[in-house]
Image (tube, helix red, strand yellow):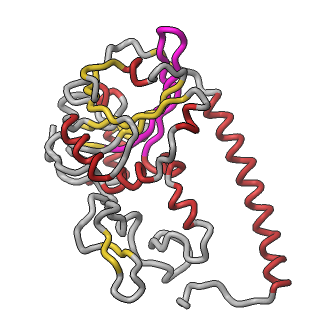
Amino acid sequence: MTASDPQVTTREEWLIARRELLAQEKELTRHRDRVSAARRALPMVEITKDYVFDGPDGRTGLADLFDGRGQLLIYHFMFEPDADEGCPSCSFTMDNVGNLEHLYARDTSFAAVSRAPLNKLEQYRRRMGWTFPWYSSHGSDFNYDFHVTLDASVAPVEYNYKDEAELVRLDPAWKGWCGEEHGVSAFLRQGERIFHTYSGYARSTEILLGTYHWLDLTARGRQEDWESEPRRGDDPFMSWLRRHDEYEPDAISGAKTPTDRPGYISSSPVACNSR
């Protein structure tokens, strides 16, 4: 037991507290339904640029990523062209991607897109054991147009719907920074026409992280320092995270714990090292 664990009570008192929480959970569900309806009702923008990607079958266009279906979800995976490994937090997100047949049953395809060359993506995907489609946008405007590669010398900097001035005002470390960021985008196809319907960045993608949602059901939660209960955990947001093959077995319990290898995650942007 830790100092932040819940207090011990009777079953009767627990039921009173649980029913109070249930009311909050139901309101959250209703609010989430309202937000989802508003997301679906967003207007859409036609894509007229001919984006070209590198895939396992050669050069391909955005329409081909739909794989014959009416909708497409793209995860913007942080993998710089000069890097040899993908971002640990993006890797965590991809570990939470389930069997795609369920998306296919709803006429929706999924793919990841990164700026690293295809051979690096394929090598890393084999290491991670993933099977989802993964395409390289290297040499195209795709990442810049969807604000997941930031470089003021190529395109005006914008991330999470904030321009560079607002980003710098919130955190001076953004000044002059360039590099990769993450996000998710949704597209709709009507005949030969393709429309952009949604993009989310930063914690908007947390909806994809099933591991976090499981942890949120537990008494100790995510064990990160931003959570309201003191002493629950002292790890900054996602700093504990490693790629799934970089945890080491704990000597006592056998449970896997983070190694000392530094992660990619940072609360602020880091110096530019790739264009």
Q: Position of residue 114 (x, y in %)?
A: 29, 37
Q: Where is residue 48 in the image (x, y as percent from the top left)?
A: 39, 12
132 or 243: which is nearer to us? 132
Q: Is residue 20 left or right of residue 45?
A: right
Q: Position of residue 216 (x, y in %)?
A: 58, 66
The answer, for residue 162, to whether it is visible in the render is no
Q: In the rendered structure, which segment of residues is drawn in magenta?
A: 181-201
Q: In this view, does 237 lie to the left or right of 18?
A: left
Residue 164 lies, with reference to residue 246, above or below; the image says above
Q: In which quarter of the image is the N terminus?
A: bottom right
Q: Residue at x 33, y 18 (%)?
A: 61
Residue 209 lies, with reference to residue 16, above or below; the image says above
Q: In which quarter of the image is the C terminus?
A: top left
Q: In which quarter of the image is residue 21?
A: bottom right
Q: In this view, does 64 lie to the left or right of 103?
A: left
Magenta stretch prevailing secondary structure: strand
Q: Which residue is drawn at 49% across and 83% down?
A: 231
Q: Is 252 included in the stretch rendered in magenta?
A: no
Q: Residue at x 82, y 77 (%)?
A: 15
Q: Is residue 117 left or right of residue 209?
A: left
The answer, for residue 150, to whether it is visible in the render is yes
105 or 215: which is nearer to us? 105
Q: In which quarter of the image is residue 161?
A: top left
Q: Position of residue 98 (x, y in %)?
A: 50, 47
